Image (cartoon, rainbow, N blue to C red):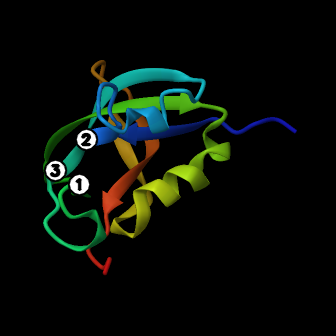
Amino acid sequence: MRAVTERLAVYGTLMPGGENHWLVRNIAGEWAQGHVLGWSYPIGFGPADGYPGITLDPAGSRVEVAILTSDRLDKHFREIDDFEGPGYRRVKCDVELPDTTRLTAWIYETDPEAD
């Protein structure tokens, strides 16, 4: 069975050089830079209090992200989901690369309904 290639857009502590990049750095794949549209801010509520958050919004500002493209991400999503916890939800988003290529990727968006 052939593995499915997925993309993960990361910001904040999961970015290369970030304090939690260890979680994704050993997943085989290729990294690229890009941006999503939305609002990035420090979360001040719920289980993700004190960490960076993002709310996707096509009318928002450019938020820089790093994009991991890998055929092994599907084997790691459960671990990443558990790490991110109830303060975030994994959703699909549009990502634009510096050359204006548009891709679809998963991203962990702030979950405003998290307790």
Of labels 1 and 2, the one closer to you:
2
Q: Provide the residue designation for mark 3.
A: 40
Q: Nearer the viewer, residue 86 or 30?
A: 86
| Residue depicted at x 32% and y 77% | 114
How far is the residue under mark 3 from the one under mark 1?
A: 4 Å
SS at mark 1 in the image: strand
| Residue depicted at x 44% and y 33% | 22
Crowding at mark 3 (Cα within 10 Å: few <14, some 14-19, many 20+): many
Q: Which mark is residue 28?
A: none
Question: Is residue 88 depicted above or below 104 in this figure?
Answer: below
Q: Are marks 2 and 3 in contact (CB under 8 Å)?
A: yes
Tell me the quarter of the picture where residue 34 sits.
top left
- What amino acid does circle 3 point to? Ser
Q: Are marks 3 and 1 in contact (CB under 8 Å)?
A: yes
Tell me the quarter of the picture where residue 46 sits.
bottom left
**Mark nearer the N terminus (1 vs 2):** 2
SS at mark 2 in the image: helix
Of labels 2 and 3, the one closer to you:
2
- What amino acid does circle 2 point to? Gly
- The image position of residue 109, as x and y in percent, is 33, 58
- What amino acid does circle 1 point to? Ile
Is residue 6 visible in the rendered image? The answer is yes
Q: Provide the residue designation for mark 1.
A: 54
Q: Residue 82 vs residue 38: left or right?
A: right
| Residue depicted at x 47% and y 38% | 23
Q: Which mark is residue 12?
A: 2
**Mark nearer the N terminus (3 vs 1):** 3
